[in-house]
Image (cartoon, helix red, strand yellow):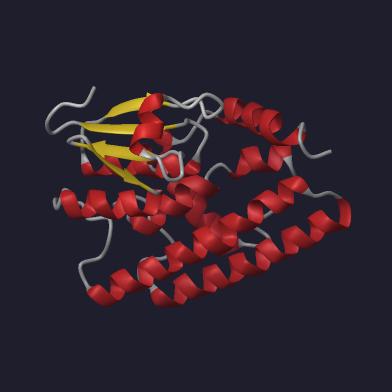
Amino acid sequence: MEKQNEVVLFGTWASAFCKRVELALKIKGIPYEYVEEDLTNKSESLLHYNPVHKKVPVLVHNGKPISESLVILEYIDECWNNTPKLLPEDPYQRAKVRFWVNFFDHQIMARLLPIIMTRGEEREKAIKEFNELLKVFEEGINKDFPEEFPFLEGKTLGYLDIVVGTALCNYEAFHEVVDVVFSPEKNPVIMAWVKALKNHPSMKETLPPHDKFVDKMREKYLGQYP
């Protein structure tokens, strides 16, 4: 399938981890072929290119596979060293961005599934923990990037914008399926940032359709967790 200098992305349309890679490719202006994977019936190509985790996303560049979404984003920024850059040029600024991206993935994103899986008091506890971490995140990036946060309309999307936006810009679908988890009243700065990200043309083009995403969430989660 792959030709010299060809970029192929194996993904699935409802995954925020895959969408972040799609968005990065678009921002950098990199032509690519997209292959939609059925994770209930994984292709031979996916198993070949990612034999360790057998998951998407996988980026194949000149026949060489790269797995794990954050690794792929950094590969894209380093391999196509053109502007716009996803990560800051300054090493200290890059380190701070990486820190908060990892905090978002390993702390905040990890708290979303317990909210879906639980009910009653357990869900309320899970939402409370999520909001406490969101507050830490909000205060931390506001302190570390006072001139850049929240995202200003018209600015080029960076590494942190891509990771946060492809996850949290689907908040309306998440609230429709579960509950209101975060809101302008509880999280005014995060919501202002997310709404600005959602209005960015590249983000709009990349996010999954609302109704289709709601149906997918209901199918995937509500049947499993009574």
Q: Residue 112: x, y in percent?
A: 65, 52
Q: Is residue 53 visible?
A: yes
Q: Residue 201: x, y in percent?
A: 36, 38
Q: Is residue 199 visible?
A: no
Is 160 left or right of 122, judged from the image as shown? left
Comparing 197 with 136, the one in front is 136
Q: Residue at x 49, y 74 (%)?
A: 140
Comparing 189 with 12, the one in front is 12
Q: Residue 108: x, y in percent?
A: 58, 60
Q: Residue at x 56, y 27 (%)?
A: 40
Q: Quadrant of residue 211?
A: top right
Locate the C terminus and report the quarter of the image it occupies.
top right
Q: Quadrant of residue 98?
A: bottom left
Residue most toward the right? 120
- Numbered label tally: 0
The vertical placement of 39 against 185, above or below, is: above
Comparing 208 with 49, the one in front is 49
Q: Residue 189: x, y in percent?
A: 54, 63
Q: Quadrant of residue 126?
A: bottom right
Locate the N terminus and report the quarter of the image it occupies.
top left
The vertical placement of 38 against 29, above or below, is: above
Q: Residue at x 57, y 72 (%)?
A: 136
